[in-house]
Amino acid sequence: MTSLRGLIAVALVLLAASAISLPEHAGADVQYFPVPSVSTSKNDGNDAGLIAPVLITDPDGELKYIVAPMIVRNSIVGTRGALNLFRYEPGGREIRFIGSFTERIERKVVFSYADPAFSQGRYSLNFGASFFKNATSRFFGLGQATSEPEQTNYTAREGRVNWRFGVYANEVTQIAVGQRFRDVRLQKGATDLPFTGDRFPAVDGVQGESLILGHRATFYYDTRNNLVSPTDGMAVTAYAEVNQNLRNGDHPVYSRYEFEVKKLFPSESKRAILVARADLQATIGTQVPFFEQSSLGGQNNLRGFGGDRFIDKHLVSLSVEERIHLARTKVAGVIADFEIAPFLDTGQVFNDFKDVSFKSYRMTPGVGFRGIVRPNVVGRVDYGYSREGGAIYAGLDFPY
């Protein structure tokens, strides 16, 4: 019965995709090109299936819409049907919607709106909302010294809402304020691993429901020539955030801080770009839920490990990759660039700054393959290797 419900849900998603009516533009071009969807990761298992993007461009050849229905078979949670909708507008304004239904447990609905040049470029505006159930989440305990035999599994049932409003002091400097709401409850996972709640019952955030309300102030300094697909410049981000756990714990208030620097070093020909990122995070307070603390592992750092492989209050990380241009060609009516990107990620998490040690750093070398439709779209597949094996991550946007 579960399998039948899953297949019916997949069919409904695909029917909805085929029935979508997009705005018609005089002279607009519509292109279809189905491609295989294959990925593997330490947490999520193996995916194999098909994604069929529909690309719609305006008369000038600029990409305006992507509609991408997808069907995959996952080795842990079964058949998944998904629908991805992306709309791109002048000034960098972007709307995203993602919905998916999986045969076992997993659900996802994500909406986001971003306008980096709101009100004639004087402000920036961001809003997002999501609900999801991730049945393959892993927890090994807190700290850098956790080992694979300690691995547990849980389903992260989460609802999130966030907004951010920024004011430009000048062309490259912005001050922003925002809030976020996060509702988290841990449930039984989809694997045969022990349930996190049984093995780590005393860890903050494991028991009961957590309702997090966060208030954040952020400083941005950004000289990059594009927010999504830059080829030159640097970006500095620093934020301070005060959070309240409205439902869990005797000490509900804690704070989080981050300082991140990203720098691009293009070659004279711009056919190769060295990109470096340094990141420092700190969490101050007691009874902080484990999922609110800093983590390493996943598609954006330590890419040879599964998501959230190492968790603790503080984090320091460094990543470098060389983005090497391979070819430019026309695909489905749009001009696309293709790159290869060897990389090295390193970092560590720790409970106290006095615990930082060069011996504790984890390293993951790897290589990425990128397809770019400038200025709005970056698709990537990254393979990272670690002492626990390797992982392949596929997704949108550069890792940094």
Image (cartoon, rainbow, N blue to C red):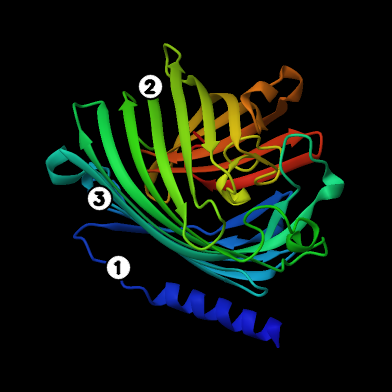
Q: Residue at x 21, y 61 (%)?
A: 25
Q: Position of residue 185 (x, y in %)?
A: 59, 65
Question: Mark 3 or mark 1, which is nearer the start of the sequence?
Answer: 1
45 to the left or right of 287: right
Is residue 380 among the parts visible in the rendering?
yes
Residue under label 1: 22
Q: Position of residue 12 (x, y in %)?
A: 51, 80
Name the quadrant containing residue 190: bottom right
- Give the amino acid at mark 2: Asp
The answer for how far apart the CA atoms under marks 2 and 1 are is 35 Å
Question: Mark 1 or mark 2, which is nearer the start of the sequence?
Answer: 1
Question: Mark 3 or mark 2, which is nearer the start of the sequence?
Answer: 3
Up the image or down, 1 lies above or below 321; here it is: below
Q: Residue at x 63, y 49 (%)?
A: 290
Q: Residue 16 or 363: which is nearer the viewer? A: 363
Judged from the image, the secondary structure of the residue bearing numbered disc 2 is loop
- Image quarter hosting the N terminus: bottom right
Q: Residue 160 or 354: which is nearer the viewer? A: 354
Judged from the image, the secondary structure of the residue bearing numbered disc 3 is loop
Q: Are marks 2 and 3 in contact (CB under 8 Å)?
A: no
Q: Position of residue 348 (x, y in %)?
A: 67, 29
Q: Residue 94 or 359: which is nearer the viewer? A: 359
Is residue 84 among the parts visible in the rendering?
no
Foreground mark, 2 or 1, reads 2
